[in-house]
Amino acid sequence: MRNLQLLYLMLAIALGAIWIFIVQDWLFLNLLAGLLYGPGLNLTSYLQKGSSPAFYVFYGGCLSAILIWITITWSATPRSSAQTRQMQPMWWLAFVLLIIFGWLCLSWFTAFQWIVTSTSPIDVPGTNMYPLGIGGWVLLMGFVVLDVILLFWLPSLLASPRNYRLVVPGAVSILGGR
């Protein structure tokens, strides 16, 4: 069974990389550009210097989290269902921390680094951050949640060992019981 789980893990990581590095930028540039619009914002420049680096760092964080989760669950041998259930708060903690980490990455690459260095990424006087509208921020924050689902929940659902798979929310209804 571990070979199949390892295959699922590698497939989920590869699909996550394609999603983050190719599909997501294409969606932002072609389908969702109107929501990211801000006064004086060059969307291509923002994607190259703001959004994409933030999501690349975020992908690294999600990859690290899923590898830590898999390492812990594959090496552990629970003696009872109570020990297995003790991992559920840890899974939720990782899930929530990844969302917060993603939002911080977006904030850093969109605003904080420009405020700290007192430079401006665009040629609009008095602006020292990328001028995203509220719709752009909501869209990007929503994509962080979607990315955590795709990059952490799905691989942990597919690649967790049988005992710990039941810790992942939705595993019983999707994959069935033991």
Image (cartoon, helix red, strand yellow):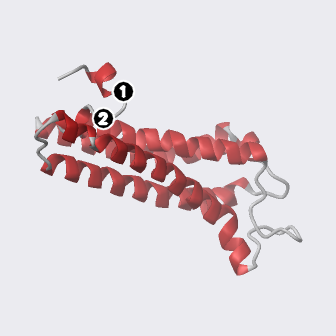
Q: Amino acid at mark 2?
A: Leu
Measured along the vertical axis of the image, is residue 50 above or below residue 8?
Answer: below
Furthest residue to the right? Answer: 125
Residue 18 percent across, percent down from the top left: 42, 45
Q: Amino acid at mark 1?
A: Gly
The quadrant in which residue 11 appears is top left
SS category of the residue bearing label 2: helix
Report which residue position mark 2 lands on. Answer: 157
Q: Quadrant of the N terminus?
A: top left
Which disc number belongs to residue 148? none
Q: Residues within 10 Å of mark 1 (few under 14, many from 20)?
A: few
Measured in 3D between alpha carbons, the distance from the residue under mark 1 to the one under mark 2, in whole angstroms, is: 8 Å
Residue sitting nearer the eye, 163 or 141: 163
* Mark in the foreground, 1 or 2: 1
Q: Residue at x 11, y 45 (%)?
A: 77
Residue located 48% across and 56% down the image: 58
Element at label 1: loop
Marks 2 and 1: in contact by CB < 8 Å? yes
Looking at the figure, which quarter contains the C terminus? top left
Residue 7 at least partly seen: no
Task: Identify the residue position indicated by label 1 in the image.
Answer: 170
Q: Which of the 4 image quadrants contains residue 151? A: top left
Q: Quick one: label 2, few (<14), some, or many (20+) residues within 10 Å?
A: many
Task: State the residue lying farthest toward the front.
Answer: 82
